[in-house]
Image: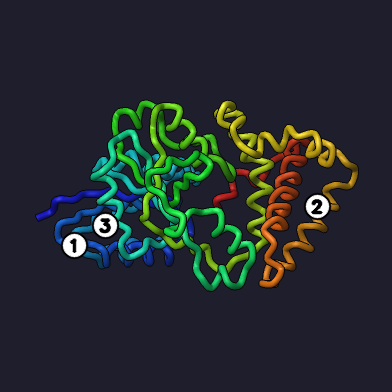
Amino acid sequence: MITEKLSLVIPTYRRERPILKILDSLNSQISNNIFIEVNICDSFSNYDDKKFKAYKDNIDIKYYNIKKNILASKRNFGINKSSFNRLILIDDDCIPNENFLEIYLNDFSNIDENTILSGIVLYPQEYIKSFNHIRFKQSRHFTLNNFDKNLNFLPDKIVAMNMGFIKSDKTNKIGLFNENFTGYGFEDFEFGYRCISNGYKLLKTKATIVHDEGQPDINNYIKKYYHLGRDGMQNLIKVNNLAAEKTIYYKIENNTVFQFFSKLIGIIKIIKILEKIISRLDKFKLLYIPLLIDFLRLISYMRGYIDRNLDKKNSEINKWYE
């Protein structure tokens, strides 16, 4: 007899193989009393949806194609299409651990509609051992070793790649993910900030995913912070200026030292040289210096900030997700 029902939403683009890994993991966790609906929200990547049929009867896989290739739009579409109020969001490169569903089900039984859950993010061990920037990224997330479920956390720690909440009239009233975030960054933070401002609690869950983006490339890591400075903060200021003012990046931008260096002649060339030097150290395990990677994030963000203020035509902003 089915007693537990869940909806999962997975926004995706050109990642069919990881999607199948996610479905395999979910399939292995299904018991007779659990029924899950999985809304896969794509943008015409032409996945072979026939492969989605080879799963248990307890899984209803729905495959949608959406014209807007925007992460927030896909999440919202999947949420609005969901049949059940208990919702889990994961990204298309996030493989759930073996007890993922069990933990979420237990947590859902202990929360109300005024709670947002955000889970553990792990990176593959072979990547952590081989790449300093992955080791650094892992250190930015909470794990079982520093888990305190009674401790509320701030919006800058919320991750939509592993999130759960109960859909309600209140959710609809405050709104879902803002679809004006067409580039990279801050849509998770803005959603979390808006939730807290409307009386929600942000709590941790032990539900765990392994975030596997494929072979790590520190240049992609640099690119993220460049886009954060060029597109992300600009979007956040327009969408929710109060939320923007609470970020560390807003404070950095208005720091006199940051302003001074960002206006130096030739600073872009200097930043690009520094980015190359630091990125070449990424595989040297003995040179793991967190402050150096923090500095890399800062200068890459500065480069994006400078380009934003030069009012260059932003031809890449809508192509970030691609």
Tags 1 and 2 touching, CB below 8 Å:
no
Regarding residue 253, the answer to whether it shows in the image is: yes
At label 1, counting other C-alpha atoms closer than 10 Å, the crowd grade (few under 14, some 14-19, many 20 or more) is few
N-terminal of the pair, mark 3 or mark 1, is 1
Q: Residue at x 46, y 41 (%)?
A: 153
Specify the amino acid type for callout 2. Answer: Ile
Q: Which residue is mark 1?
A: 31
Q: Which residue is mark 3?
A: 102
At label 2, counting other C-alpha atoms closer than 10 Å, the crowd grade (few under 14, some 14-19, many 20 or more) is some
- Residue 142, image x and y in percent? 48, 54
Specify the amino acid type for callout 3. Answer: Glu
* Secondary structure of the residue carrying numbered label 3: helix
Q: Which residue is mark 2?
A: 271
Position of the N terminus by quadrant: bottom left
- Residue 133, image x and y in percent? 63, 62
Disc 3 or disc 1, which is closer to the eye?
Answer: 3
Q: Residue at x 47, y 61 (%)?
A: 122
Tags 3 and 1 touching, CB below 8 Å:
no
* Colour scheme of the rendered structure: rainbow
At label 3, counting other C-alpha atoms closer than 10 Å, the crowd grade (few under 14, some 14-19, many 20 or more) is some
Q: Residue at x 25, y 51 (%)?
A: 106
What distance separates the C-alpha of mark 1 from that of mark 2? 53 Å
* Secondary structure of the residue carrying numbered label 2: helix
321 lies left or right of 95:
right
Tags 2 and 3 touching, CB below 8 Å:
no
117 lies left or right of 193:
left
* Secondary structure of the residue carrying numbered label 1: loop
What distance separates the C-alpha of mark 3 from that of mark 1? 10 Å
In the image shown, does 201 or 245 lie closer to the viewer?
201
Disc 2 or disc 3, which is closer to the eye?
Answer: 3
What distance separates the C-alpha of mark 2 from that of mark 3? 47 Å
